[in-house]
Amino acid sequence: MKKTSTSVLPAGGALGDEPLLAVDDLHVEFVTRQGVVKAVNGVSYSLNPGETLAVLGESGSGKSVTAQAIMGILDMPPARIPRGEVRFRGTDLLRLPEDARSQVRGQRVAMIFQDALSALNPVFTVGSQIGEMFRVHRGASRRDAEKKAVELMDRVRIPGARQRVHDYPHQFSGGMRQRIMIAMSIALDPEVLIADEPTTALDVTVQAQIMELLAELQRESNMGLILITHDLGVVADVADKIAVMYGGRIVENALVHDIYRAPAHPYTKGLLDSIPRVDQKGQELYAIKGMPPNLLAMPSGCAFHPRCPYRQDNCVTEAPPLYEIGPTRSSACHYWREVLDGSHG
Amino acid sequence: MAATGEPILEVRDLVKHFPLNQGIIMKKQIGAIKAVDGVSFDLRRGETLGIVGESGCGKSTLAKLLMALERPTSGSVKINGREIAQARGGELKRVRRNIQMVMQDPYTSLNPRMTVGDIIGEPYEIHQEVAPKGDRRRKVQELLEVVGLNPDHINRYPHQFSGGQRQRIGIARGLALQPEIIVCDEPVSALDVSIQAQVINLLERLQNEFDLAYIFIAHDLSVVRHISDRVGVMYLGKMVELGKDTEIYDRPAHPYTQALLSAVPVPDPDGRERRERIILQGDPPSPANPPSGCRFRTRCWKAQEICAEQEPLLQIRPGTAHASACHFAETHDVVHV
Amino acid sequence: MSDTLAPAAGRARHGKPARPPKPPRAASLWNDAWHDLRRRPLFIGSAVLIGIFLIMSVFPWLFTSVDPFDAASCRLADARQGMSGAHWFGTDNLGCDVYARTVYGARNSIVVGVTTTVVTALVGGLLGLVAGFKGGAVDTLFSRITEIFFAIPSILGALLILAVFRTGNVWTVMLALAVLTWPMTFRIMRAAVITAKSQDYVVAARALGASAPRIMFRHILPNAVAPVIVVATINLGGFIAAEAGLSFLGVGLRSPDISWGLMISDARERFLEAPGPLLFPALFLSLTVLAFIMLGDAVRDALDPKLR
């Protein structure tokens, strides 16, 4: 017998003060031969229905690991979560037993990945892979599942869905494969969609199509979207708010307009300053010096201090907390005032 | 950057078709992938020509043709007046000294089982006449310094370096023979965002220092704009627009260029609701079976009958100061509206 | 330029310095690998074991004063004795000293095992390198040839080859084994070469104008050799065992030749009464195989800079 509802989780509807999804002081570690790697170090963010949160960071910043912890798809071990909560409608997913967890995963919180080709199984038709969501979670018949698959392929605008439902993943272009992934992820009308670098492998014109599709699906269903990316342009285009990650921590939290107008953390400011601008033609670009930190040998104090132009002595010894610097903003920099002033000037 | 004098690289009607064969023993050609189909341009000393386009447009094949890693089906590539497309043996080896490349992926472009000294010194072993044997290690160390790496790390292996540092090693290898032209095939797209600016600055500094000419192939249009003097836009094996950077970015004339520019996300959320966005429908057609006439016509909102019948040539058209390949070319600033 | 590693300023050499700083020792893969190997306990252990077995096979009289080829050394009256001071490993069915026979058996077994391994690795490896690198018609030709060999059941093939020669000695046994097993090395090498060939660093070398031999031996071979080393060392034990199998079928070595394989097959029937004549040569055989597998692992690891 298939359980059709999860008793532990409240159904949709009014939320009160609790956000749709809240990550609270999450820590994720990996036990490796070289030692314990602290990939995520006290990350908190929240998401409301219909909202788009961009998680911005480079490789090793912990942005994808956080998402995998939310989904519950981390391999444990080597990973472990020593502290933190992931609350979905007020219920901590990390404390749920596995069978209740799997009712959430894919149904109410879904995820799409960067590499659609490797995320799809090459030996099954796309139709059967999309339809499988209905067969597994809703107990639909093979025929119904296929009908649903065609509907979904139409909804993500794959031309000729009725004919192509029997094709295999390799017969589709990169953009179309990403659409198939999206179709699978929205099959069960999730309330939260996590998109991990969904357009990084795609060309700009296809990227534009996919981002537009995601925005449209979001408008229709009012789902919350977590967009994980390293692309400042994509963030500016679609996000409502941003969490900037560096070395496993959130270094800045802000509404999208605030952060582009005046960043309050030296790392964010460095990233924005290093974007080539038209009036800088022929000049040297601003470049953040040095390299992203090695997770096995994190710098003391503030992880960004070896690369930071605002560094003072206490940055080396004292890790800055996430200072509340406004009603919707926070920055993990001792000298956020100076950074903010420098940004305005 | 003052790009002056005679072109050091002349490309004329360059064509590369990869045959599609059927059958195992009796091979029969059933068609061809028209990866590059009639591309022409010049490159002058000290100049940077950016090449943009999406995957499958032929820009990587173009790079391989320029490097003589593939033989063209027809057409010519001349470096300082010397034909490279047909050159072989010693002649080809001599020409190669003048054109080198920087590859996209710093993780696969360095042999993991060679030391940095061997990797950067290999050009000297292949071209023995460039540096006498006793001099080579010193030269390698100088090159490491030039690209901003510690010369004492000459005995390390690639895996001991970060991505950005590896890309510097690749650049040092490209510089070793003191070429006049460097083909950069997506040199920063595999790097972390905070590292890309460092590498772009390095490339610009080296260009000034050694008077290098770059062919800069990339899909990141803002990076191409920053570094390029001229820009060529490719679509399905054809160059559809070619002009100065300001002409291409501020006054694009080809509908594809306009769509491409409007699709680039702008890192500024202000006014994002008002921005003009041309969202192209569908995917580019297969290069094995490109549309007749204008190759962009199947996705173009301006297409008319003539577009299917007659191929538009890359030429200067009424109302524009630079070359474009569209029957209905019309400049339109999509970025600053 | 900003880079954390480079103390670039002030290092430029202006004018004529009296003596430029001496560049450090030039490291290379093989130097570094050797340097690293000498420190690996795995390598030292296996090298000592292999050294002992090699000395044993060249100078067996250093290890025992008994000459097992001398008929007088065996006395039927002493048959199937256990371990004792006079016969360390006991005696066999015919009353011969098992220890002396094991020591003298090392030569044939190790010569068969090592030579066949080296020959198959070289022939299969080299042909695999060429076929994988050249591709096209060369590859097709070699690959079809190996498929023919794969189609021959190995026992039948060995029987056939040895029947042609009519004599079963070390050389014909090696030939039979090598002829039948080089295709496996070929296939492994060819696959590894094809993977390595498409790597960007090979493209980069071609762009520099590197010659085909340079690309094959400097770039592809070091990156493709690891699986061949592993398979070759595992095969080594198989060859020693296969020699025993052929002897058992009566086409391999024959008495009065001595080899571990022969000894094992001779002792099988009376194993339950007298396990010594089987166990001791088997122990030596296992130690030899183990030593070579350890050596192979150590060499493979040393050739991978990431594992150092």
Image (tube, coloured by chain):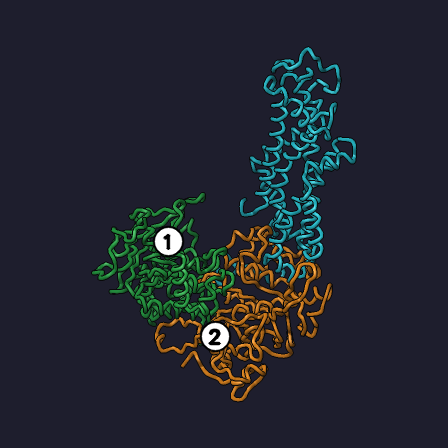
Q: Is residue A125 left or right of residue A137?
A: right
**From where the camera sits, is residue C151 visible?**
yes
Q: Is residue A336 left or right of residue C3?
A: left
What is the three-letter code of the residue carrying label 1?
Val
Q: Is residue A228 above or below residue B48?
A: above
Q: What is the secondary structure assignment of the residue under circle 2?
A: helix
Q: Which chain is displayed in orange in the rendered image? A: B
How many angstroms separate mark 2 from mark 1 (CA)?
Answer: 41 Å
Q: Are marks 2 and 1 in contact (CB under 8 Å)?
A: no
- Which residue is under mark 2? B260
- Which one is in front in this view, the residue at disc 2 or the one at disc 1? 1
Point 22% across, 62% down: residue = A14
**How many numbered badges does the structure rendering display?**
2
Q: Colour of chain A?
A: green
Q: Is residue B61 above or below residue C161?
A: below
Which one is in front, A96 or B227? A96
In which chain is the residue bearing label 1? A
In which chain is the residue bearing label 2? B
Q: What x and y, as percent, mark residue C201?
A: 60, 57
Q: Is residue B111 left or right of residue B162?
A: right
Q: What x and y, as percent, mark residue C116?
A: 70, 37
What is the three-letter code of the residue carrying label 2?
Leu
- Which residue is under mark 1? A136
Which one is in front, B18 or B135? B18
Q: Which chain is displayed in cyan in the rendered image? A: C
Q: What x and y, as percent, mark residue C247?
A: 70, 29
